[in-house]
Amino acid sequence: MEEIITKRRNKLNLTNIEGFWLTGRYPLKHFHQAVSFQPRMGDVFVAGYPKSGTTWTQYIVWDILHYGAPLPSVNEIWTKEFTHLEMIGTDNLIDLPSPRLLKVNMPFHYTPYHPDAKYIYVYRNPWDNCVSGFNHYRQVEKKNYSDATFEEFFQSFMQGEVSQGDYFDHILSWYDQKDKPNIYFLSYERMKMDPGKAILNIARFLGEEYYENLINDNQLFENIFRNVQFDQMKKNCPLYFITSLNDGMKKSNEKLNFFSKGVVGQWKEYFTEDQKIKMQLKCQRKFRGTELLSSWNGFDIPSLESNLSSNVKF
């Protein structure tokens, strides 16, 4: 029996569906369609926790498969070109030819799986992910959340009471599957450090022919590389505020600042020392025994391999 609980967590309205938190931006009908969807051979999924770089990754995949074409708007990429399953639903997907391009922000155990589909999971360090989520919700949930403080969102994030649930459990659910040949576990920070290499690696994962196209056609590679730079996406790929999703997408004329800075290290503008240590301790506890503890070494991220002694209370 489905359990639905609606909770007002520090002014962020959430609905709990059998243990999974969602904001009202995700109609319950579409969530149920997403988890029961039947993938097929050749489908390409981009997955990740919200604000981890999934939309950027979608654009890279889309432009590789469309040979460097001008990019569509964010509204179009989510609803027509690269369907966000739990947001848009699956009604229009059955008759689409392969490869169908699909996005999810769900943990692995909720994500429709097919051994002959391809899955790119992008993950981002929790400090910057938390900051990006805070700024995002203040835009899209501004009726209830525009005056929220970072401390309020930080507490919700640490307790897993934000849309799409617990950040740490989300990453671990996919980390446990990362050695499957049809899953590519992708670091946002390494994408930012060397986007050209990321484009080539993604192309090779999609198929050797796409990789060869980029290796042999420098102009094609340069077109894609230029198109997916953050400054270009901010200019050319607008996102308009969606006012309704239940009866078809209805968008307003209000443009959102979706691609903000996208930098590594923005967390330092928001986190107190107390919050930083809390996050370090939580990461050490949740990611113990995994390579995730060292995955952000060399970036502008607090160390997760040092011993911390703290009187911080969770």
Image (cartoon, helix red, strand yellow):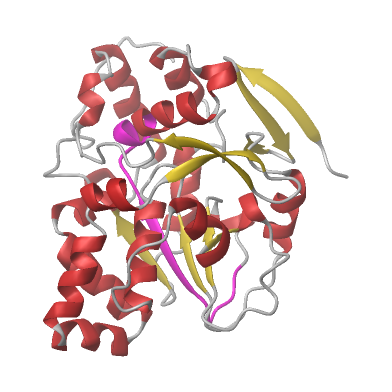
Q: Is residue 173 above or below residue 276?
A: below
Q: In which quarter of the image is residue 204?
A: bottom left
Q: Where residue 35 sits: x, y (%)?
A: 69, 58
Q: Who's the residue at 52% across and 25% down the image? A: 159
Residue depicted at x 44% and y 73%? 180
Region rendered in magenta: 113-130
Q: Which residue lies furthest to the right in this view?
A: 1
Image side of residue 194 versus residue 83, left or right: left
- Locate residue 186, reporting x and y percent: 32, 59
- Judge by depth and name the residue closer to the eye, 289 or 15: 15
The residue that appears at 44% across and 37% down in the rendered structure is 255
Per the image, is 28 magenta? Answer: no
Residue 203 lies, in percent from the top left, at: 29, 76
Q: In which quarter of the image is the N terminus?
A: top right
Q: Where is residue 152 shown, x and y percent of the image?
A: 47, 14
- Quarter occupied by the C terminus: top left
